[in-house]
Every structure is written in structure tokens, then in C-alpha cells.
Image: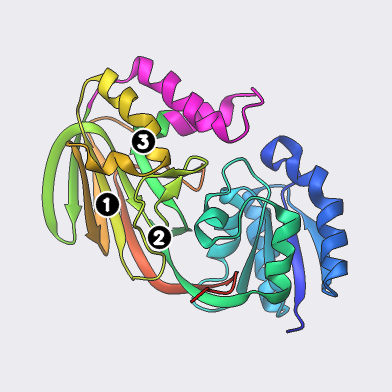
Amino acid sequence: MERAVCVIVNPQAGGGRAARLLPGVEEALRGHGLSFRVERTRSLEHARELARAARDAGEVAAGFGGDGLIGAVAGELSGGAGTLAVLPGGRGNDFARKLGIGGDPVAACAVIAAGTERSVDMAEVDGRAYLGIASAGIDSDVNRIALETRLPLGGLVYLYGALKALLAWRPAHWEVVIDGTPRAFDGYSVAVANTGVFGGGMYLVPDARVDDGLLDVVLMDNMAKRRYLANLPKVFNGTHVREPGLHIVPAREVAFGADRPFTAYADGDPIAELPATVRVVPGALRVLAPEARP
């Protein structure tokens, strides 16, 4: 299928990784016979403007950067208004991982050329769209530390952030309303998952589906810091879900807040101040993905 493509690239993504790999991506797109143009972003808002322009021109909007950029572009294509392609160029690349695209943006060009369109769910927090997981609590501190560090840690930056955040952490009291049912607890965090993956390959909800019309709300009770630390490596293979104190509840809408201020982060960027309300938008996004295997 012939597709005109607008590559929306964040040159700073992945500590400059996207900029370094851009020539290879351009060569691969030409090799696949694709018509394309490249636009460099100055900010997430600029990325949204570029996505709207690509959408209105009937082009595939190919986000080339981290999950924050991909989420910003996707938000302008919701409701079937356009088609998203994913070129993983950040440190986490969790949405690409969930779709089976992998972490190589040059190889991902083949998906733009020959992949199939599939419809996936999106989530909205106070009107702003995201793809992966919105979370707050200790995750707020982890994301802030990850964004602020200049250490060349790649995908391990979120693990570094978790270790550093844990040192100063104290439990919060949470008030949560899940599809109209209230509950309260003391603990580490509330997370609302669409894809179930974040932090550079942490499978917070390993069985999450992106096309079931549901979100997964993850509540983490208070526990000793040493136990939290022991469970942290398990998140990379999903075995942490067997541990007591972790509750995963399906939902279509969730509102949550805490007894002290927190910023909720989604797709690696701040998205809302608590209290916040998250809703699922079923099948809202068309995205190019590898052809499904029988």
C-alpha cells in the first residue's frame, strides 16, 4: 500500500539517539519506496501541531522519539482521524515494545511500508490522551528523577530513578473511585494502565490488552522498603503480580487523589496534577503494527 508519511522527530529523544539514527531511517524509508517528509519538533505542543497538519493532509504521522512524543502525536489522531506509525527513538520505547515493533527505528520502517492497521484503545486523563500508563505516588518521584538526570543510563534510567526515589519515600493515603466504587488505602502508588508497560520494559500489568476497551488500575499497598526493592526486578518479567499487596482492578473510569500533592506522569511526561480522572476511549487510534501471526 502506498503511504505518504510525515516523520515527526524529536532530535533530543534518547539523549540525541533519534537525531543520530535519522539518516538511517530516511535511507530505509527511501529503500521501501515511501514518499515522506521530515519535521523536527521543538516541544510536545509543536509535535501536536505537526500531527494535526499531517492528519489533515492525509499523511501517516510517524512519531520518531520517546513514548511522550508518540503519545502526543497519537492524541491528535484519535477517533480514527488519522493513522499513527511508531519509530522508537527514546529511552523507554514501551508502546513500540507492546505492539511488537521492537526498539530499532530503522527496522520499524518496514512496518510503515508493509504493516497492517489495527485499532487500539487510548486513555484520557482530564482530557489529555496517553497510550501507556498514568501513575502517581512514588512513580511521580521516579519519573521526575529520570527526566532530570544527565547520566547516560539508557533504558536503565527508570530503575535508577526508582532506587533513588525509594530512599526518601514515605507512604501516602489514597482515595480511589473505580467505576463508581470508592476505596481507600495507604501505600506507594496508583497506576492506570492501557498498554501495561512503562519504564523501559517494566511489565506492570503483563496481561494488559490494548484492544479490550478496559483499563487496569494498579494499587500498591504500603510495605517495607526492602520488600519493595526485592520486588522491583520482578516487574521486568511480570512475576511481581503474585506478590501480596498489589491489586489490579479492571475499569472504564477511575478517579484518584492523595493526602499530599502529586504529579501524575504518563508516557514518561507529566500529564496532570492530582486529583485526576482517567477514562478509556475504546478503539480510538489506528496504528500501523506488524502483521499478526496465526
Query: Relative to residue 113, is residue 187 drawn left or right?
Result: left
Distance between the alpha carbons at the discs numbered 2 and 1:
14 Å
Looking at the rendering, the stretch of residues picked out in magenta corresponds to 142-171
**Prevailing secondary structure class for the magenta stretch in the rendered image:** helix
2 vs 285, nearest the viewer: 2
Q: Name the residue at 88% across, 60% down.
A: 27
**x, y (%) of residue 169?**
32, 20
In terms of secondary structure, where does tag 2 sit?
A: strand
Which amino acid type corresponds to the residue marked 1 in the rendered image?
A: Val
Asked if marks 2 and 1 touch (Cβ < 8 Å), the reply is no
Query: Relative to residue 154, is residue 170 drawn left or right?
Result: left
Q: Nearer the viewer, mark 3 or mark 1?
A: 3
Q: Name the residue under label 2.
A: 124
User: For the view shown, which residue lies furthest in the bottom direction?
Assistant: 1
**x, y (%) of residue 72?**
57, 57
Asked if marks 2 and 3 touch (Cβ < 8 Å), the reply is no
Residue 167 is covered by the magenta coloring: yes
Dot 3 or dot 1, earlier in sequence: 1
